[in-house]
Amino acid sequence: KETLIVDCDTGIDDALALLYLLRDPDVDIRAVTTVFGNIDAVTAADNTLRVLELAGRPDIPVAIGARDNWLGNAHFAPYVHGADGLGNTDLPAPTARPVAEPAAELIVRLARENPSTLHLLAVGPLTNLATAVLLEPELPGLVKHVTIMGGAIRHPGNATPAAEANISNDPEAARTVLTAGWPITLVPLDATMGERITEGHQRRLRETGTPVTAFAAQMLDQYFDFYEGNVFGDRSAACHDPLAAAIAVGDVSPVLAPVVAVDVETSQGPGRGATVADVRGQYRNFPAQDDAHVRVVLETGGDFAELLADRLCDDPTPTRR
Ligand code: BDR
Ligand code: CA
């Protein structure tokens, strides 16, 4: 189906995205690379290894990447994802270790070894991908596709009024990646905020009672706390990273997704980190854009959380709990 490198800042929804992908035997995750964002990059790698081991995949290599953004002013989001990044769920410490190779070098090496094969799924700040492009300017021609969770086109930002968190965390890197010319699918807040996982799904996960579903249900407590207090006002949350994962592997087909050029605002003003996409053409018949190479997912069906819960609950070896 797809051969992926998943680049993430593991994080509650990053973990859900990994678990979602790991339940599909046709998806081949070649490596997971980590970046600062929800949590620091080293803890993100540790969290990733915990999640991979929970899912029975300690064999997947995990590489640590950027510990800071290009301007050196990174901050983390424990108020969203919990102090440990995984909703304070206390998964056992991993037995495997991250590989020594830095994330950007690993991405470049695997792309050179497997030209036109790899799909990069980026669900954190884009620092590792941008650094990889600087290391290997031919990278955009070596990769099959890039799917990114990030940005806010017609939807307000979440980190700032203008900017979504993954882009806001490193606008210069995001600009480098989004204008690099490779085929990109961008999954912004416009799509992800419309895909909500609810208490009903959480109940199902809890009742299914496998180690994976029990962990997912427990993480959702922290995620719902944040979303209830700061966003939706009820116990539900947006499926950001899992939706991008599902789109990357073809499980979800966008309802509305124009192919346009996207740039990123890198000024120090209030628009910093805004993703500027020329979506005027959806209203009128605009001339084709020369550098249009980003498929911007503006709408999906609204029932993705059902698929996410189905996938996580379909465990052949349930335990009692
Ligand atoms: C994005 O920011 C992070 O908090 C989430 O993991 C997701 O990748 C949503 O804005
Ligand atoms: Ca993320």
Image (tube, rainbow, N blue to C red):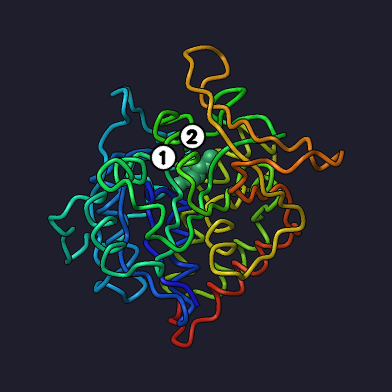
Is 102 rendered above or below residue 39?
below
The residue located at (76%, 59%) in the rendering is: 301
Mark 2 highlights which residue? 167
Q: Earlier in the sequence, mark 1 or mark 2?
A: 1
The residue located at (44%, 51%) in the rendering is: 122
Mark 2: amino acid: Ile
Give the image location of residue 106, x and y in percent.
23, 57
**Are the residues tagged 1 and 2 within 8 Å (C-beta)?**
yes
Mark 1 highlights which residue? 125
Is 287 rendered above or below residue 169?
below
Task: Please name whichever residue, 127 or 135, is drawn nearer the observer in this view of the structure.
Answer: 135
Give the Cα separation between the discs numbered 1 and 2. 6 Å
Q: Mark 1, residues whose alpha carbon is within 10 Å: few (<14), some, or many (≥20)?
A: many
The residue located at (29%, 56%) in the rendering is: 107
Give the image location of residue 263, x and y in percent.
55, 32
Q: Which mark, residue 111? A: none
- Assign a secondary structure to mark 1: loop
Which quadrant holds the C terminus?
A: bottom left
